[in-house]
Amino acid sequence: MQTHAGFALVLGSLLVAGNAFAQGAPPDAPPPAEAPPPAAPPGAVPPPPPANPPPEAAPQQPPPANYQQPPPGAYQGPAAGPYEPPPPAPTTDDPTARYHDGFYFRGSLGGGALSATLKADGSSTDTEFSGGAFSLDLMFGGTPTGGLVIGGAYFFSQAQKPKVKTGSIETESNNNFNFGLIGPFVDWFFIPDGGFHAGLIFGGAVASVTDSSGRESSTATGAGGGLFLGYDFWIADQWSLGVLARGVGGAVTDDSVDPKREFTVGNFALMFSALYH
C-alpha cells in the first residue's frame, strides 16, 4: 500500500515538471528603476541651457533626370571682382627726357628794331640809321652741368631801307643795313627741367650796307655783345618751343675808306624759338 503511494507521488512530480517545461522558462525579473537625479541644494544656480544645436542639414533633392555632370576642365573660375588695382605709374627709359642736358641747338626767328650811328673822321655831323629789322639766330652748344649751356652762336639782323638822318635832313635809304654778332654764349636754365632761361653772348661784330641785289658797299668790323631772356615749353622729350627777347649791340669800324668811319649799333628783337636740348 505504501509502495503504491510513493509511486503515485513520484509520478505526480514528473507530470508537474513536464507541464512547466512545456510552458517555457519563467520570465526574467524586471530591471531595477533608475534612481532620480539628486536634488540641487538650496540656492544653487541652475546650469545654463545647452548651446543651439547645429541646424539639421536640409534634405538634398535628387538631381533632375536630365542633369549632366560637366566634363573635366570645363569649370571656369569666378569672374574678377569690380575692384582692380591701379596700373603702375608710367616709366621712361630715358632719364634725360624733358631735362636740359646734353647737346643744345636753338633756332630763333623774329623781328624788332635796329639803330646805328655813323661817325666819320673830320666830320662834325653824325648820320643815324633806324628802322624795323628782321632777325635770325642760330646757337649750338653742350651742357657741362644740369641747366648750364656753353656754346657758340650767330645773331643776325637786317633793317631794310632804313631811315637816314644827317643833321636836319631825313631821307629813306635805298640800301639795307645789316648787323651780325658771332661768338661764345652762356645760357642758364634756372630749373634744369623748367622753361625759364637767361644768357649772354660776346664776340666779333660786323656791320655792312648792301643794295637790293645783296652787293656790299661797305663793311665795318669790331666787337659786340648782348643779353637774352626767354621761356621754353616742352612739346616732346627733347624738343621745346618758346619765346625769346634779346638785345645786342656793338662798335665797329671801317678802315677801308678815307676818312675812317665808325658805327655804334644797337638791336632789339622779340623772337619765336625752337630748341632741341
Image: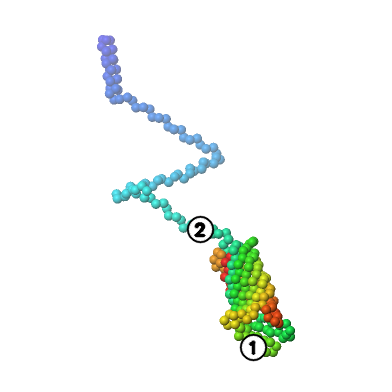
Q: 10 Å neighbourhood of mark 2: few (<14), some, or many (≥20)?
A: few
Dot 2 amino acid type: Pro
Q: Is residue 119 above or below residue 238?
A: below
Q: Position of residue 64 (x, y in %)?
A: 31, 50
* Residue that appears at 34% across and 49% down: 70
| Front tag of 2 and 1 | 1
**Which image quarter: residue 248?**
bottom right
Of 75 and 119, nearer the camera is 119
Q: Earlier in the sequence, mark 2 or mark 1?
A: 2
* Residue that appears at 61% across and 83% down: 175
Q: Residue 87 got which mark?
A: 2
Quadrant containing the N terminus in the rendered view? top left
Q: Work out how far the residue at label 2 is from the one at label 1, CA to CA, in angstroms.
A: 71 Å
Q: Disc 1 on helix, strand or loop?
A: strand
- Mark 2 near mark 1, Cβ–Cβ under 8 Å? no
Quadrant containing the C terminus in the rendered view? bottom right
Q: Which residue is mark 1?
A: 171
Of 162 and 246, nearer the camera is 162
Of 13 and 44, nearer the camera is 44
Q: Position of residue 6 (x, y in %)?
A: 28, 12
Q: Is residue 20 above or below residue 80?
A: above
Give the color scheme: rainbow, by chain, secondary structure or one colour: rainbow
Q: Residue 68 got which mark?
A: none
Report if residue 157 is visible in the image: yes
* Residue that appears at 43% across and 46% down: 55
Q: 10 Å neighbourhood of mark 1: few (<14), some, or many (≥20)?
A: few
Q: Is residue 52 above or below residue 242?
A: above
Q: Disc 2 on helix, strand or loop?
A: loop
Q: Give left or right: position of 153 versus 77.
A: right
